[in-house]
Image (cartoon, grey):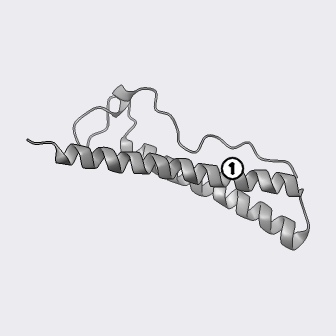
Amino acid sequence: MTIPVIAPAIPRPAGLSDLAGPAGSSPPGGVSFASILNSAVSEVERVRTVARQGTEDLLIKGKGDIHEVALMSQRAELSMELFQQVRNKLVQTYQEVMRMPM
């Protein structure tokens, strides 16, 4: 069993200008914040599914190598931790913006 190549959990936008624009509209580049967020959630879930499947294959079917399964599990854990840190930073930023006097 070989370790599948896994893309970064959170896609990187081409630039911050891609995210600028009025609320609820897509920026000129066509990339919206919601699509980036959905893509990130899907990627984290895919990495977790691959790790879970590798673990099941090793434990139930006896297929695979324990080192490869450990690497897949670690990748899944790191992807989730990174996603949680990004989420926490977004919530913190939102809370700071909401505290600004208008």
Q: Is residue 12 above or below residue 67?
A: above
The residue singled out by tag 1 in the image is: 75
- Residue lying furthest left in this view? 102
Quadrant of the image occupied by residue 6 = top right
For label 1, the crowd category at 10 Å Cα-Cα, with few meaning under 14, some 14 to 19 and many 20 or more, is many
Q: Residue at x 78, y 64 (%)?
A: 55
Q: Secondary structure at mark 1?
A: helix
What amino acid does circle 1 point to?
A: Arg
86 to the left or right of 44: left
Residue nearest the viewer, comparing 24 with 15: 15
Q: Residue at x 38, y 34 (%)?
A: 30
5 to the left or right of 38: right
Q: Residue at x 40, y 36 (%)?
A: 31
69 to the left or right of 19: right
Residue nearest the viewer, comparing 72 with 21: 72
Give how far across and how far down residue 83 sits, in percent.
Answer: 51, 49
11 to the left or right of 58: left
Give how far across and how far down residue 29 sits, in percent.
Answer: 38, 29
Give how far across and how far down residue 43 sits, in percent.
Answer: 58, 50
Which quadrant, please, contains the C terminus? Answer: top left
Give how far across and how far down residue 64 sits, in percent.
Answer: 89, 58
Q: Residue at x 53, y 42 (%)?
A: 10
